[in-house]
C-alpha cells in the first residue's frame, strides 16, 4: 500500500520541526528611578526595542535558538524602565534540506519563541509598576534578510 511508504514518500521523509524545550536563560528588569518613575507622565514615553537571534548546534539535529530582546522606556533623560530577556528553545530539525536549514533555524524557530517572550516582557513590565508592554509582532524574515545583507557586506569589505 502506498500509505505505508513503500515508494519512499512516507511520513519519515517529511520535514519536521519539533520544540523539545523552551526556557528563560536570563531576565533582567530595572526600575532605576522608582518610585518617582511610577507617577503619571505628562508625555508618552519613548520606547526603544532591540531584537537579536542566535543559534547553536547541539548535535546532529538539535539546535538551541536564543531570542534576545532588550528594551527601555524614557521620558526625556528620565529612564522609566529597562529590560533584557534571553529566551531560548531547543529544536529538533529532521528531513530539512541543507539549503533550508539556516532560514528555518533563524526565522521559524524564533517565530515560535516570540509569543512566549512577549508575554514574559509584558508581565515583567507590569510587575515593575507600569502598564504591560505588548510588543508588536516581529518580521523575522526581514530581520534575517538584514542580517544576511550585513554579513555579505562585511565579507565583501574584508576581501
Image (cartoon, rainbow, N blue to C red):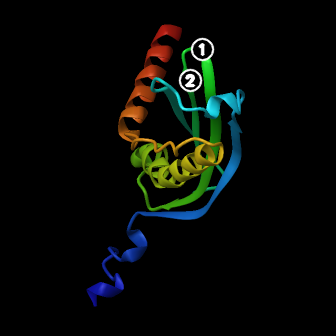
Q: Position of residue 154 (x, y in %)?
A: 50, 15
* Res 159 visible: no
Find disc 1 in the rendering and name its residue: 77
Give the crowd class for mark 1: few <14, some 14-19, many >=20 residues within 10 Å.
few
Specify whether 16 is left or right of 19.
left
Give the crowd class for mark 2: few <14, some 14-19, many >=20 residues within 10 Å.
some
Q: Secondary structure at mark 2?
A: strand
What whole-number distance in Å separates the C-alpha atoms at marks 2 and 1?
A: 7 Å
* Res 44 visible: yes
Residue that appears at 33% across and 83% down: 6
> Against 89, is 125 above or below?
above
Image quarter of residue 125: top right
Specify whether 41 is left or right of 80.
left
Residue that appears at 52% across and 30% down: 50
Image quarter of residue 4: bottom left
Find disc 2 in the rendering and name its residue: 74
Q: Secondary structure at mark 1?
A: loop
* Mark 2 and mark 1 residues within 8 Å of each other at the beta carbon: yes
In the drawing, what numbered circle is on residue 27? none
Residue 144 vs residue 92, the one in the foreground: 144
Residue that appears at 54% across and 63% down: 19
Q: Position of residue 97 (x, y in %)?
A: 41, 53
Residue 54 vs residue 40, the one in the foreground: 40
Q: Position of residue 148 (x, y in %)?
A: 43, 28
Position of the N terminus by quadrant: bottom left
Q: Position of residue 104 (x, y in %)?
A: 43, 49
Looking at the image, which residue sits at the far bottom?
1
Residue that appears at 47% across and 55% down: 112
Looking at the image, which residue sits at the far left?
2
> Against 132, is 8 above or below?
below
Specify whether 104 is left or right of 28.
left
Amino acid at each position: 500500500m502506498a500509505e505505508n511508504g513503500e515508494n519512499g514518500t512516507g511520513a519519515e521523509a517529511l520535514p519536521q520541526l519539533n520544540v523539545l524545550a523552551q526556557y528563560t536563560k536570563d531576565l533582567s528588569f530595572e526600575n532605576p528611578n522608582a518610585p518617582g518613575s511610577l507617577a503619571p507622565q505628562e508625555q508618552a514615553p519613548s520606547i526603544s526595542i532591540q531584537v537579536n537571534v542566535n543559534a547553536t548546534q547541539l548535535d546532529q539535529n538539535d539546535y538551541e535558538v536564543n531570542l534576545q530582546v532588550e528594551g527601555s522606556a524614557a521620558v526625556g533623560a528620565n529612564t522609566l524602565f529597562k529590560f533584557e530577556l534571553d529566551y531560548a528553545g531547543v529544536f529538533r530539525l529532521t528531513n530539512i534540506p541543507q539549503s533550508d536549514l539556516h532560514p528555518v533555524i533563524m526565522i521559524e524557530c524564533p517565530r515560535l519563541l516570540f509569543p512566549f517572550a512577549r508575554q514574559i516582557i509584558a508581565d515583567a513590565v507590569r510587575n515593575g509598576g507600569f502598564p504591560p508592554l505588548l510588543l508588536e509582532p516581529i518580521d523575522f524574515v526581514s530581520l534575517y534578510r538584514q542580517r544576511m545583507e550585513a554579513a555579505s557586506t562585511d565579507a565583501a569589505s574584508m576581501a
